[in-house]
Image (cartoon, helix red, strand yellow):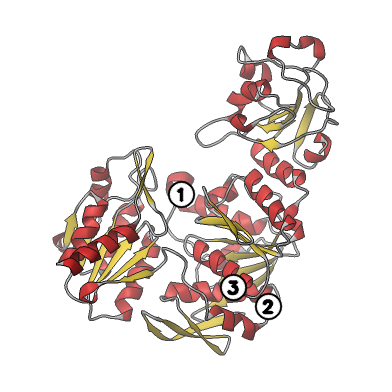
Amino acid sequence: MRLENIIKDSGVTEVLGDPGIEIRNICNDSRKVGPGDLFVAVRGHDTDGHAFIGKAIEAGAAAIVCEEDSSVASLLQNDSRVLLQNDNCHPERCPEPVEGQSEGSVTFIKVASSRHAVAIMAANFYDNPSRKLNLVGITGTNGKTTTVTLLYELFMAQGYNCGLLSTIANYVGTRGSEAVNTTSDPITINSLLNEMVDEGCEYCFMEVSSIGVEQERIAGLDFKVAIFSNLTHDHLDYHGTFAEYLRCKKLFFDNLGPGAIAVINIDDKHGDVMVQNTRAKVQTYSCKGMADHTCRIIEESFEGMLLRIDGREAWTRLIGRHNAYNILAIYSAAMALGADPEETLVAVSKLEPAKGRLEVMRGPKGLSVVIDYAHTPDAMDNVLRTLREIDRGRELICVFGCGGDRDRTKRPEMAKVAEEYSDRIFVTSDNSRTERTEDIMDEIKAGFSPKGLAKTISIADRKEAIRTAIMLAPEGAVILLAGKGHETYQILGKEKHHFDEREIVSEVFGSINNN
């Protein structure tokens, strides 16, 4: 594709060189640059892509995008060369030219914001694939993965070819790949959307994180439906304040086009705020009061729930009040997309819970181990309250930790929630990363009252904490393993170690049976 078509509407302030050259590929990682590529130097949270412009040129980049306040000469210094004319080239350091590129020439594109520019350029490079399918995005603190995964499964079950972009995995039709971030970088997003279009996908369901919005990873995408689930305490390590966290979530809806539909949980006090400045049509859903779509829980057990949605009864295998909201969000989004109500509810009744979300493992002595991704105070409250309400006569044991190098303010809040609902608590590790596990545990325990501390056991080794919790559990107890969910690893220091809680639970159950 010609460079001038890629950079269209991306905030270009100056072009140094030939904008008519052909570009083979677009990337923002200098290690992936090849001859004839466009390299976009993006300022990241930990590294600045401008520092790798020289390496990109040495790898054969035909064009460089950098921010207008960057001095190209000072960035390159002795690392490489600035090549705008053939006679400036050192032959021994110049890659072979590609078709349409003068020998030794590099075109520099200056932009106001390379974060914004790379998103628009990626969309242009892949011929704006989000406009060729029905793109549905969901943002909120909790419920994003469950909602997009179930929407994907719902529409696939009804015969549509779909794509999925989630925390757990990305899917193009039935072909899956592991996801790295909740919201991928814009080049990856547009590349995957382009694959979906090529595979004949009609829908894509996508998680949209506040960090992804703030870093403009979704700029240039054309969303047909945008869902808001809820807003509670999270990611303050990145955003600094709750007000900034809210602002970034709201930006998703501020930037929607007039042809989009915003589907909003009106029971959340921030629901109205999200759509104050949106151009999209607004539809609301509620499990408490009046809204465009409503839901009530009629019956609930460990096997599932009987719901009344818009006056129709429907059974779901999911459990918990928060999952009633997730199901209602799915239904509301389907209605916004023009689906049939009866057919949608029939399909909903066949959906399985997402992996690591209230995933129940039955064991000896009538024990039930529940694995859930809950890693925020609100998510922990939802899960523990659900387990307590389903069966008040069983002992409820909670095993949890908190991630290192992340929002520290939620640690004592998690402790308060665990204390409120749990009969016994095990404080342990999560993904400690570069923090000392013991320091994280101390900050968690600062949230307990003396009564809470009296029913708390601290075991830094998570596997040992799980084993001990199960072995000491009385007959019929429910043990919640919170925080890891679908993850099959634990990050200690800067290394990932295999850690699958299902395997650990099965091993402990086996040892009980053998005894």
Q: Which residue position holds label 1?
A: 241
Instruction: Give how far apart the Cα atoms at labels 1 and 2 are.
Output: 39 Å
Q: Which mark is residue 154?
A: 3
Say which residue appears at 68% left-offset and 29% top-offset: 34
Image quarter of the N terminus: top right
Compare residues 426 and 376 and report the one nearer the observer: 426
The x, y position of residue 393, in whole percent, is 22, 81
- Compare marks 3 and 2 and give the one earlier in the sequence: 3
The answer to whether residue 5 is left or right of residue 412 is right
- Looking at the picture, which amino acid does disc 2 mark? Ala
Compare residues 354 and 253 and report the one nearer the observer: 354
- Compare marks 1 and 2 and give the one earlier in the sequence: 1
- Within 10 Å of disc 3 (Cα), the crowding (few <14, some 14-19, many 20+) is many
Image quarter of the C terminus: bottom left
- Looking at the picture, which amino acid does disc 1 mark? Thr
- Within 10 Å of disc 1 (Cα), the crowding (few <14, some 14-19, many 20+) is some
Residue depth check, mark 1 versus mark 2: number of the one nearer the observer: 2
Q: Label 3: state its secondary structure.
A: helix
Q: Label 2: state its secondary structure.
A: loop
Residue depth check, mark 3 versus mark 2: number of the one nearer the observer: 3
The x, y position of residue 416, in whole percent, is 28, 61
Q: Residue furthest front?
A: 514
- Within 10 Å of disc 2 (Cα), the crowding (few <14, some 14-19, many 20+) is some
Residue 169 appears in the figure: yes
- Looking at the picture, which amino acid does disc 3 mark? Leu
Say which residue appears at 56% left-offset and 30% top-offset: 48
Instruction: Give how far apart the Cα atoms at labels 3 and 2 are.
Output: 11 Å
Say which residue appears at 59% left-offset and 44% top-offset: 215
Q: Which residue position holds label 2?
A: 339
Compare residues 122 and 288 and report the one nearer the observer: 122
